[in-house]
Image: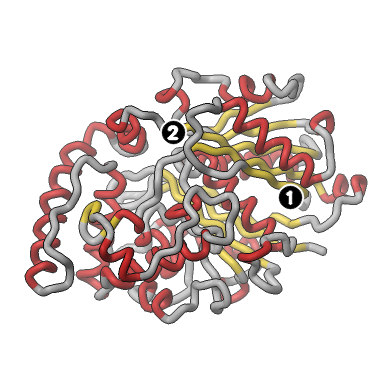
Amino acid sequence: MRDVYVIGVGMTPFGKYMDKNMKALAADAVNRALAHAGITKELLQVAVVGNAYQGLVTGQESIRGQVVLRAMRIGNIPVTNVENACCSSATAFQVAWMDIALGLHDVALVLGMEKMYMEDREKRLKLFSASTDVEFVERLVQMLKADAEKKRKEAEAKGEVKKEKNSSGGSAFMDIYAMAARMHMNKYGLTQRQLAVVSAKNHNHSVHNPYAQYRTPYTVEEVLAAPPVAFPLTRPMCSPVGDGAAAVILCSKEYVKKLGASKPVKVLATVVGGGMDRSFNDPDIGERLAKIAYEKAGVGPQDIDVAEFHDATAFGEVVNTESLGFCPKGEGGIFAEQGHSTLGGKLPINVSGGLESKGHPVGATGAGQIAELVWQLRGEAEGRQVQGARIALAENGGGNIGIEEAAMVITILQADF
C-alpha cells in the first residue's frame, strides 16, 4: 500500500442557492481545489463523487458525478458515484484513497455535493427520513414526540425550561437525536445547559469562517431561549438545511515529489464502518471505529490537535467527544463546559462552526470537514486557526437505524512538511 496525500482542497460557502444548480456548485468547488493544489483538470486520472439526495430532489440518478464533471469538460476518466447518507463524500474519500494506495492511479478528485434547499418544506424534511429505516421511522417518531413532550413537562415542573411547547413537523433525525440526548441525560446527568454551551461555542467559531452558512454569535442563554425543536434541543443546537459542494485532490507520494507540491497532508487513516443492533450500554459505532482508526494511524486521542465532529445536533458533538476517547463516558458536556473544545482549548472541536452553523448539505459534509482540517494543518485557517496543529481527525456519521448511525467514517490526517 502506497502513502497517499492531500495536495489541495476547495469548497463553496454552504448556504441556500435557489439560483444555482448542482453543476455550478460542483464546478466552483473543483476549481478551487485545483487552484489550491496548483494543478489543472487535465492531470486528474480518476474521480469519486459523493451525493445522497439528488435522485429525490431533481430525479438525477445513476450518473450524478459524470453529469457535473462532464459539464466542466472533465471526461475520459473513471468516475465512481458513492451514496452513503451524510458520509457520502467521506466514503468517496476512502474509495479514492484505496485507488491510489493500491497503485491504480496517481491523482484523484474527490467531490461531495448536495442541493437540499427547496421551498416545499414537507418535501425537504422527507429527505432526512430517507436515511432511516423508512418502514419503521414514522411509528418511531410518534413515540419519540410523546416521550419528548413528557420529559419537557417534567423539566418545566422543575423550573429547568421555560413553559413552551415543542415545535412540530421537524425532521425525523432531530427527534432521534433528542431521544439519544434524553437517554444520556438520564444515565449520566448531561444537562440542557451543557448542550447550549456546545452550540454557543460552535456558533461563535463560525463567525471566523467565510464558508459557514450562518455566522451569527450566540450566548448560552440565547441558545436556551431559542425556539424548541424536541426536548432538550433548541433551534441553534440543530444543523440547518442548505446547499454546497467540497472537493479534495489526492495523489501518491511519488506524484507529490513529481509535482513539487507544497505542504502535502498525509492520510494516516480513513476507516468506514457500519452500525449494529446493540443495547444502550454496548460500545457505540464511534467507539468501535475510533479504535480501528487510531490503530491504523499509529496515534491515540492524546495526539489529535484539532477535530471536526458530525454535530447534526449539539448532542452529536457531546457523544463523539466521549466515544472517540477525548474524555470519559458521560463527561462530554463537562468537557465543553470547561472550555476544552473551544479554539484555544486543549482539543479544539468544530472550529469551522460545525454542522450547526457551517451547514450540512449532506453529500458535501464529509469532504467539507476534510477541507477544513487540511487548511488547519497547512496553517491557512486565518481567524479560526489552531496554532501548531499537526494531526487532525474528522468524524462523519450517516443515516440512522435503531439507536446509532447506519454508517460512519473516521479520517486522520497529518501535516507532512
Residue ranking furthest to the bottom: 338
| Residue drawn at 23 percent across, 38 percent down | 137
User: Mark 2 and mark 1 in contact (Cβ < 8 Å)?
Assistant: no
The kind of residue tagged 2 is Met
Q: Residue at coordinates 84% horizontally, 44% vertically from top-left?
A: 38
Residue 321, relative to residue 241: is it above or below? below
Res. 267 visible in picture: yes
Q: Which mark is residue 116?
A: 2
Cα separation between marks 1 and 2? 28 Å
In the rendered image, which quarter is residue 109 located in?
A: top right
As drawn, 28 above or below 348:
above
The residue to which callout 1 is attached is 6
Residue 92 falls left or right of residue 97: left
Q: Is residue 240 left or right of residue 365?
A: left
Of the image marks 1 and 2, the number of the one nearer the N terminus: 1
Q: Where is residue 389 in the image (x, y as percent from the top left)?
A: 68, 70
Label 1 secondary element: strand
Disc 2 residue crowd, few under 14, some 14–19, many 20+, Cα 10 Å: many
Question: In which quadrant of the rendered view does residue 153 lie?
Answer: bottom left
